[in-house]
Amino acid sequence: MPESPEALYARVTASGLNRTDVAAEATFPWQVVDGTLEPKPLAPPAAEPVARTGADGCPICASLPTERTIWENDDFFVSRMFRPSGLLILFLQTKQHIDFTELDDDLAAATGRWEVILCRIVERLPHVAQTYVIRFGSGAEHLHLWFVARPDGFPQIRGSLGLEYDEILPPIPEEVLGPDLHEIARELATHGGRARV
Ligand SMILES: [Zn+2]
């Protein structure tokens, strides 16, 4: 079961926050100028687009089936986050190497159905306020939708900047995360497919 706000606060207060190197990333949009946080200047248009991982060397295809998978059916699988995370984060992915905009109507409909089912299941967990659904895909073309559970009780952890707490908060202990993943997988399987944890 997810921690209560009080339990999460106590754990984080005891272990402290992680310093991240997000400010060193090229996409970090701010910089300190004379002690003031200012937007970085917009760089001129790049000559080449940022390459996305295609079918050759696709890490998602290469890792199937993966130990991170918690549920699967013939077309999709749901995986846990690929690194220790301070937030409950899951991915809905296709088994086929296909980009989001290449889904045919049947797979698009099924994607939408599993999106809603997964959101319902995660939001029924205690102390989960909301589930964010995100399609980035800037790094890899293989369809992978992010599902980020926003913890209840922390107005500071909201919206796009709230995602930073994935790395700022100490990782969710496995004894907390494991039972949640089991419950999510079990609930998914009541709608079809197979639980893997
Ligand atoms: Zn792939």
Image: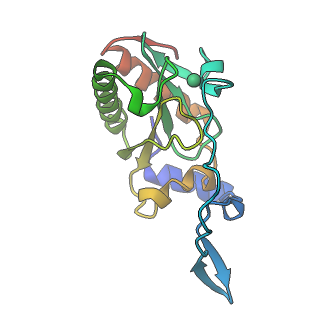
Give 92 or 60, whichever is nearer the viewer.
Answer: 60
Estimate the x, y position of residue 174 in percent, counting from the top left: 61, 33
The residue furthest front is 47
The residue sitting at 35% across, 30% down in the picture is 118
Q: Is residue 7 above or below residue 112?
A: below
Horizontal and vertical percent for residue 95?
Answer: 49, 17
Residue 73, image quadrant: top left
The residue located at (27%, 24%) in the rendering is 109
Image quarter in which the N terminus is found: top left
Q: Residue furthest bottom?
A: 34
**Which quadrant of the frame does ligand 1 lie within?**
top right
Image height of 71 relative to 11, above or below = above
Is 169 left or right of 133, judged from the image as shown? Answer: right
> Which residue sits at x=42%, y=14%?
75
Number of callouts: 0
Q: Position of residue 37 (x, y in %)?
A: 60, 81
Name the spot of residue 3 as percent of width and height, x first: 47, 43
